[in-house]
């Protein structure tokens, strides 16, 4: 049973400086008559990106929470991870019953509905992971939430929204050159949730707005959910230990071996997620 305020009340007891008094998405009004500028650049702030953000938000200027979500007496959410343990899980029908279904990056829905469901309320992504099928893997009203790791991510969004010439220089892998979405479905995540995930949940040390290791998109979605939702369940998170042959995702054959080249600290995130589970702030639909 979903209890209003349940996650917030539990999180406030155990997470230092936890607060729900933050906007979820960046808004155009944030950049008019600014009296308090951001301290850091992306990913922990917007310093130095104000002008281009104003241009992007002038196009994607619908930053409201959809009415269907606002009217909910209690927000019952599930964050669907991309992990291999979703394969043959048969969780599709269960996932589709949640009020809010949050998906990650380019994880497909089409042809995997039996295991991962078909409903998508929000999809968290960054430019290099924006290769999901916008028709088959989303619903017409799905919110596409950009998680900005760098100023270049905002520049990419500006170019695709304005149909300007795209370039892939500066990205760690290629980005979509054709990306046609409804501008009213676009949101830009408030960098507060990146800072919260890194410093409060993962306990990383940020020096002068910089950090060597950044949270994954999945962990960012959990950070967001424990502020946005009244009840949070997760599925498809966690990796098997010491098995480089194990597939990472439910939808492809890439193995655990490639994680050794990743800049993310997966063991640290696993510890943080396990802590949230033990504190009963979130609950798990799959094993962890």
Image (tube, rainbow, N blue to C red):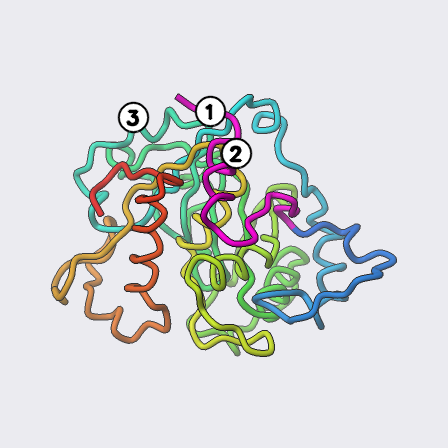
Q: Position of residue 15 (x, y in %)?
A: 48, 51
Q: Percent x, y for residue 171?
A: 49, 74
In this rendering, is residue 244 above or below 162? below
* Left or right for 214, reference 93: right
Q: Is residue 31 left or right of residue 257?
A: right
Decide: few, some or many residues near mark 2? Use Cα within 10 Å; few <14, some 14-19, many ≥20. Answer: few
Question: Which segment did they paint magenta?
Answer: 1-25
Helix, strand or loop: magenta stretch: loop
Labels 1 and 3 touching (C-beta < 8 A) = no
- At 47% from the left and 65% from the top, the residue drawn is 175
**Earlier-in-chain disc, 2 versus 3:** 3
Q: Which residue is mark 1?
A: 3
At mark 3, the secondary structure is helix
Q: Which residue is farthest right?
A: 33
Task: Identify the residue shown where x is 69% and y is 49%.
Answer: 60
* Numbered marks: total: 3
Residue 140's tag is: 2
- Give how far apart the Cα atoms at labels 2 and 1 are: 29 Å
Q: Residue at x 23, y 57 (%)?
A: 248
Depth order, front residue of 100/207: 207
- Disc 1, SS: loop
Crowd around label 3: few <14 · some 14–19 · many ≥20 (10 Å) = some
Q: Nearer the viewer, mark 2 or mark 1?
A: 1
Cβ atoms at labels 2 and 3 below 8 Å apart: no
Q: Secondary structure at mark 2?
A: loop
Residue indicated by mark 3: 93
**Of circles 2 and 3, which is in front?**
3
Q: Is residue 36 left or right of residue 263?
A: right
Residue 179 lies in the magenta-colored region = no
Q: Is residue 9 magenta?
A: yes
Q: Nearer the viewer, residue 250 or 160?
A: 250
């Amino acid at each position: 049973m979903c209890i209003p305020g349940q996650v917030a009340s539990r999180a406030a007891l155990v997470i230092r400086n936890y607060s729900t008094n933050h906007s979820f998405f960046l808004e155009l009004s944030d950049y008019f008559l600014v009296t308090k500028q951001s301290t850091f650049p992306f990913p922990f702030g917007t310093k130095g990106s104000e002008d281009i953000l104003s241009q992007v938000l002038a196009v994607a200027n619908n930053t409201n929470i959809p009415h269907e979500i606002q009217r909910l007496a209690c927000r019952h959410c599930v964050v669907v991870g991309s992990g291999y343990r979703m394969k043959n899980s048969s969780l599709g029908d269960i996932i589709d019953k949640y009020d809010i279904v949050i998906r990650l990056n380019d994880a497909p829905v089409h042809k995997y509905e039996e295991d991962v469901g078909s409903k998508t309320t929000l999809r968290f992504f960054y430019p290099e992971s924006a290769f999901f099928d916008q028709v088959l893997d989303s619903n017409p009203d799905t919110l596409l939430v950009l998680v900005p790791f760098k100023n270049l991510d905002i520049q990419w969004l500006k170019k695709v929204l304005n149909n300007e010439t795209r370039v892939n220089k500066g990205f760690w892998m290629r980005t979509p050159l054709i990306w046609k979405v409804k501008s009213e479905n676009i949101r830009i995540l408030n960098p507060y949730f990146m800072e919260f995930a890194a410093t409060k949940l993962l306990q990383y040390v940020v020096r002068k707005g910089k950090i060597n290791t950044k949270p994954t998109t999945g962990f960012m979605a959990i950070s967001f959910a424990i502020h946005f939702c009244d009840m949070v369940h997760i599925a498809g998170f966690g990796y098997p230990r010491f098995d480089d042959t194990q597939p990472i995702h439910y939808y492809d054959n890439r193995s655990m071996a490639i994680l050794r080249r990743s800049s993310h600290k997966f063991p640290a995130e696993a510890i943080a997620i396990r802590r949230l589970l033990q504190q009963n702030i979130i609950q798990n639909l799959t094993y962890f």
